Amino acid sequence: MNIHLILQMAADAMGDREAIVSGGCRATFADLADMARSVAGQVQPGERVAFLNENTPLMPAALFGAALAGTQFVPLNYRLAEDRLESLLERTAPALLLTGQDISTKNIRAISMLEAGSGVISDMEAPDIDGGVAVELFTSGTTGEPKSAVLKHDNLMAYIFGTVEFMSACEDEANLLAVPPYHIAGIAAVLSSTYAGRRMVQLPNFTPKAWIELAQSENITNAFMVPTMLQRVIEYAGDSLDLPAMRNIAYGGGKMTRQTIEAAMRLMPHVNFTNAYGLTETSATICMLSPDAHREAFESEDPEIRRRLGSAGQPIPTIELVVRQEDGTICGPDEIGLVYVRGDQVSGEYKGMGSQLDEDGWFLTKDRGYLDAGGYLFIDGRADDVIVRGGENISPGEIEEVLRAHPAIKDVAAVAVPDVEWGEAVGLAIVCQADISDDEICDLVKAKLRSSRLPSLITRMDELPYNETGKLLRRVIRDQIAN
């Protein structure tokens, strides 16, 4: 199996269909196939294909070109500081690097975007790489040195075959790609759009204004957004958002607040919303809250159904999912534990560390969560984010959920802060949109939760720190509070 087969099928069956729109560039699937062959023809033995740039048509060409050359595709975060980028480049070498930057790292052969796309078109055939690695993705590294997640051809093809039908998109469908190319959602969007035959419209640098204008000018029908992107679009739009062509918006990559998704559904009642929960290590989506489930929860008066609007949905058909206590016991409904998943698309492997799957093929996501009686998954937070106060585990998510329900609070994060008596205590970082006192905040927590959840420290911020893929940087908040 080789992911290049996806592009080959698209080029053979619908080569004249428009594949990519990026600035002034417009290319068909046949054009994309030629660009991929141009990239593949420049790869030397032993080299990976690395990509260091914002979204351009050469990103999908590099992804498929690497597969055609029988090597790995390694997209890098072009926003990193020079020293961190140098470290990742050293770990990626030897590599052919497609970039617009001036790079002189040893065993990195950097070429420009123009050179990458204008090489001799190779006539090589894609090798059948049984168990071979297709993509290496560095994790966000918000709590330490990034790990290199390994995704094999078989993992990615299992995800595509299990979630997308070939040529299922109509010719007028267009997918707005605003997530960066080094995010798993960016990889998955290229693969799924190519297999479905859906036009990919690239937005190199997200702003709500640019996103709305591009969605309008290109008659965008589909989009994927991280929660912070959707929140910013909603805030920018105000009371009116004119996107008549938009049909489907999927979101993921971080926790979506109920307030934001409810506002989005009121502003765009004609749009189908999908929560796509997944991880880099699982080749993207493993759980989905479907459009029908969104509407059912949004319209329901039953609090048990209504709360599902804040869930990650149910496992997709090709995925098994369980929630376990630390001793391995399966949790009952609404009982918080550790989330494990299993399926052909699940890699669970890191370069230099080997497979993290257990003997039965289960992968520990390191997310804490619970399943309700209907099998809907609720993510409570990362296992590492738990606040341990006097031996009691406190979930930041339960405190944040209570406080976000107050109209004066725009955003909030609960983190562990040092405490002489208890070891750790609850610290709050809050973004307010109206006046609310510290005493009122404490009263809110006390009314809904136990006294151990009361914050010992509250700090106000203009905004909370998120990375470009929508993940809350709790470590940064802890450092800021400590200082």
Image: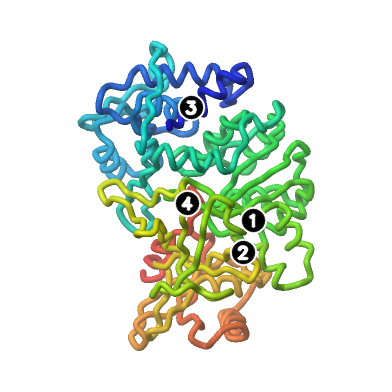
Ranked by sequence position, the earlier of labels 1 and 3 is 3
Q: Between 65 and 93, which is closer to the camera in this rendering?
A: 65
3D distance between C-alphas at marks 1 and 3: 30 Å
Compared across the picture, whether 390 is left or right of 230 comes to left
Residue 348, above or below 258: above
Ranked by sequence position, the earlier of labels 4 and 3 is 3
Q: Which amino acid is tagged 3?
A: Leu
The picture places residue 259, in percent across and down from the top left corner, at 67, 62
3D distance between C-alphas at marks 2 and 3: 34 Å
The picture places residue 140, in percent across and down from the top left corner, at 40, 50
The answer to whether mark 1 and mark 2 are in CB contact below 8 A is: yes
Ranked by sequence position, the earlier of labels 1 and 4 is 1
Q: Residues within 10 Å of mark 4 (few under 14, many from 20)?
A: some
Task: Indicate the secondary structure of the residue bearing disc 3.
Answer: helix
Residue at 54% in and 64% down: 379
Q: Which circle marks residue 376 in the picture?
A: 2
Q: Residues within 10 Å of mark 2 (few under 14, many from 20)?
A: many
3D distance between C-alphas at marks 1 and 4: 19 Å
Compared across the picture, whether 332 is left or right of 58 comes to right
Identify residue for label 4. 343
> Which image quarter: residue 81?
top left
Identify residue for label 3. 5
Nearest-to-viewer mark from 2 and 3: 3
